[in-house]
């Protein structure tokens, strides 16, 4: 395991991973002809972490077909750069299920892609990073401990949202992620009524280790 204590060296190391490991080795090995397009895709996904993604919109921005875009997503998922989370709705007809969110397995790689390696106090995307970090580490925990679960996000067409509904052991758990201690969390009344047996929990800095380890 590599240990780097100097902050400038850490930034340099992350950028080398992007340039050498990702762009040269993975993409060339996967026979990607338009490397610049897949790198542009990664940047768009990095800026949209935690937001719903429209493949049609991405395709229009990158000027590539939907089939090509889906193949790029498959490549990036297969080499553990990004992963997809889909919408949840069983009892609520208002639930949005056709869209997806994309997250990065490693937030350092995400930050290096957009060339923003600033410390937390100098960032405006801390909420996005916190959500991505919690989710990726939570899924690693499940993989390591061999915990089987189905994981989603939830949003209605009238913009009610929940970060992380999770089906596990025939039960439904719902998590909201909160970085700022001043942020107020309000669980959707419609969701609580539709899923009365669900367990709700807010994940903050002081209880995040239980969620991740």
Image (cartoon, rainbow, N blue to C red):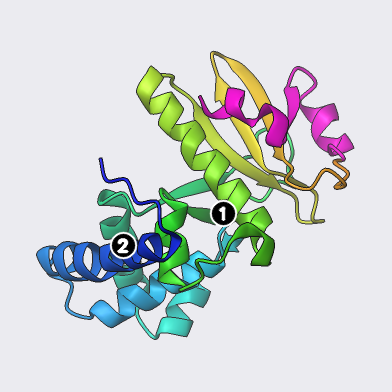
Q: In this view, does 122 lie to the left or right of 70?
A: right
Q: Which residue is drawn at 41% across and 48% down?
A: 105
Where does the image place residue 102, in percent across and percent down from the top left?
A: 49, 55
Residue 139 higher or lower than 156, as above or below: above
Q: In the rendered structure, which segment of residues is drawn in magenta?
A: 186-213
Mark 2 or 1, which is nearer the eye? 2
Q: How crowded is mark 1: few (under 14 residues within 10 Å), some or many (20 or more)?
A: few
Where does the image place residue 176, in percent across and percent down from the top left?
A: 72, 38
Name the quarter where the N terminus is drawn. Answer: top left
Where does the image place residue 130, in percent across and percent down from the top left?
A: 62, 48
Residue 185 higher or lower than 125, as above or below: above
| Residue 209 belongs to the span the image colors magenta | yes
Q: How crowded is mark 2: few (under 14 residues within 10 Å), some or many (20 or more)?
A: some
Which numbered marker is on residue 173? none
| Residue 121 belongs to the span the image colors magenta | no
Q: Which residue lies furthest to the front in this view?
A: 6
Which numbered marker is on residue 13? 2
Where does the image place residue 194, in percent across and percent down from the top left?
A: 79, 29
The residue at which mark 1 appears reads as: 98
Q: Which one is in front, 146 or 129?
A: 129
């Amino acid at each position: 395991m590599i240990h780097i204590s100097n902050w400038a060296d850490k930034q340099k190391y992350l950028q080398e991973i992007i340039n050498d490991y990702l762009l040269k080795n993975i993409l060339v090995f996967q026979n990607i002809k338009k490397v610049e397009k897949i790198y542009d895709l990664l940047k768009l996904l990095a800026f949209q972490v935690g937001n719903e993604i429209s493949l049609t919109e991405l395709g229009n921005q990158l000027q590539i077909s939907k089939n090509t875009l889906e193949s790029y997503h498959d490549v990036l998922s297969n080499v553990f750069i990004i992963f997809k989370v889909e919408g949840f709705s069983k009892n609520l007809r208002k639930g949005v299920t056709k869209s997806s969110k994309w997250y990065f397995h490693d937030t350092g790689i995400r930050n290096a892609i957009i060339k923003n390696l600033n410390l937390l106090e100098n960032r405006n995307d801390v909420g996005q990073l916190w959500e991505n970090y919690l989710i990726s580490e939570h899924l690693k925990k499940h993989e390591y401990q061999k915990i089987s679960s189905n994981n989603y996000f939830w949003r209605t067409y009238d913009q009610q949202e929940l970060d992380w509904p999770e089906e596990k052991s025939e039960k439904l758990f719902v998590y909201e992620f909160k970085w700022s201690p001043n942020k107020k969390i309000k669980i959707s009344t419609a969701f609580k009524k539709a899923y009365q047996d669900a367990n709700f929990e807010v994940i903050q800095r002081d209880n995040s280790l239980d969620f991740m380890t």
